[in-house]
């Protein structure tokens, strides 16, 4: 075989091999949750979904492969300044997914890098409106703002932003020291406030207890006096009723025959018994002058015998004289 024949054979063999490779590559199997962007002669032709597909060799080619699954991307740390001119370093993580593979391929050069850059700039702008203390409290506001901004451009880029989370907000060491001292002072203030509130409540409880004790004592004293007054009133009433009953009994006895003589006899016995007690007394007592005549004394008191008419005697009383000790 001549050199020319060998060269022709090599050329035709190479062409056949290249053609075979192209035919093999024209058979495309797209996996699940993937989409292939096909270009024909350099222009967008179609989007291939999951399954078996055959392309035209030398005319069609797979230009982009889009992954439709949700993916997370780290947002690198960046320096931000708060509204009170404190430098902080913020990083985060963003969760996105491709919804329109054609827009993701042709709408932006690199949708991942574009989403991360937009998230960084939005984070800087939001933190610039907050002071240092609020940056730690407004994480949800920062996350919501980044998601809202990315959602505005998401349709043009063919992506959907599911959520964004701020991971860390780092402050300079000097600022951290100041914050720690501030937190220590705040804890001390809360402790002092709690102790003062406890002392205040204890004093209130003690005074309330004293007040209730005094009220209970006064109520008890009032009830005791009321009970004593009621007892004395009942006693006086009972004595009065007994005296009234006794007077009625005496009046009934005096009205009977011989009642006055019996009363005079009983009074005479009581009279002499009392005189005996007075004789032995150590104090000086005034007694009537007619001490030895009990009948005259009883007449003087207005108690006549049954043989005398009812009424008081007008016999003048003699002057009293003292009994010697």
Image (cartoon, rainbow, N blue to C red):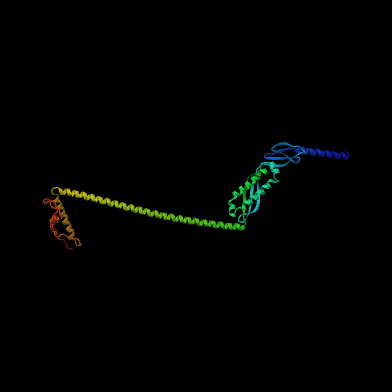
Picture quadrant of residue 8: top right
In the picture, which quadrant includes the N terminus?
top right
Left or right: residue 260 versus residue 20 is left
* Residue extending farthest bottom: 324
Q: Residue at x 27, y 51 (%)?
A: 233
Quadrant (top left/top right/bottom left/bottom right) for the C terminus: bottom left
| Image mark count | 0
* 76 or 143, nearer to the observer: 143
> Who's the residue at 62% across and 48% down the image?
145
Residue at horizontal 21%, vertical 49%? Answer: 244
Residue at the far left in the pictured view = 307
In the orientation shown, which residue stands out farthest toward the right?
2
Q: Position of residue 179 (x, y in %)?
A: 58, 57
Residue 9 position, x and y percent, is 84, 38
Judging depth in this view, the residue of 103 and 319 nearest the camera is 103
| Image position of 282 (left or right of 137) | left
Residue 320 placement (x, y as % from top left): 16, 61
Residue 28 falls in image quadrant: top right
């Amino acid at each position: 075989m001549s050199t020319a024949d060998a060269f022709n054979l090599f050329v035709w063999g190479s062409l056949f091999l290249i053609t075979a490779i192209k035919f093999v590559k024209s058979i495309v199997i797209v996996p699940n949750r993937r989409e292939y962007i096909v270009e024909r002669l350099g222009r967008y032709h179609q989007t291939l979904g999951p399954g078996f597909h055959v392309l035209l060799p030398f005319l069609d080619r797979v230009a982009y492969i889009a992954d439709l699954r949700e993916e997370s991307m780290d947002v690198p740390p960046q320096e931000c300044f708060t509204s009170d001119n404190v430098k902080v370093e913020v990083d985060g993580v963003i969760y996105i997914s491709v919804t329109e593979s054609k827009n993701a391929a042709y709408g932006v050069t690199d949708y991942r890098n574009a989403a991360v850059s937009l998230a960084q700039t939005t984070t800087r702008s939001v933190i610039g409106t907050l002071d240092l203390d609020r940056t730690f409290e407004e994480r949800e506001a920062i996350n919501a703002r980044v998601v809202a901004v990315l959602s505005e451009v998401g349709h043009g880029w063919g992506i959907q932003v599911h959520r964004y989370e701020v991971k860390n907000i780092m402050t300079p060491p000097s600022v951290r020291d100041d914050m720690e001292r501030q937190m220590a002072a705040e804890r001390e203030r809360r402790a002092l406030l709690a102790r003062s509130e406890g002392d205040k409540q204890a004093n209130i409880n003690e005074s309330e207890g004293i007040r209730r004790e005094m009220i209970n004592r006064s109520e008890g004293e009032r009830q005791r006096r009321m009970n004593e007054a009621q007892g004395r009133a009942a006693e006086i009433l009972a004595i009065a009723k007994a005296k009234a009953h006794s007077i009625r009994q005496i009046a009934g006895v005096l009205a009977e025959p011989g009642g006055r003589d019996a009363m005079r006899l009983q009074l005479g016995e009581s009279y002499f018994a009392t005189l005996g007690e007075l004789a032995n007394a150590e104090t000086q007592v005034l007694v009537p002058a007619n001490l030895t005549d009990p009948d005259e004394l009883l007449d003087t008191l207005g108690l006549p015998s049954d043989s005398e008419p009812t009424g008081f005697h007008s016999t003048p009383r003699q002057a009293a004289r003292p009994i010697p000790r």
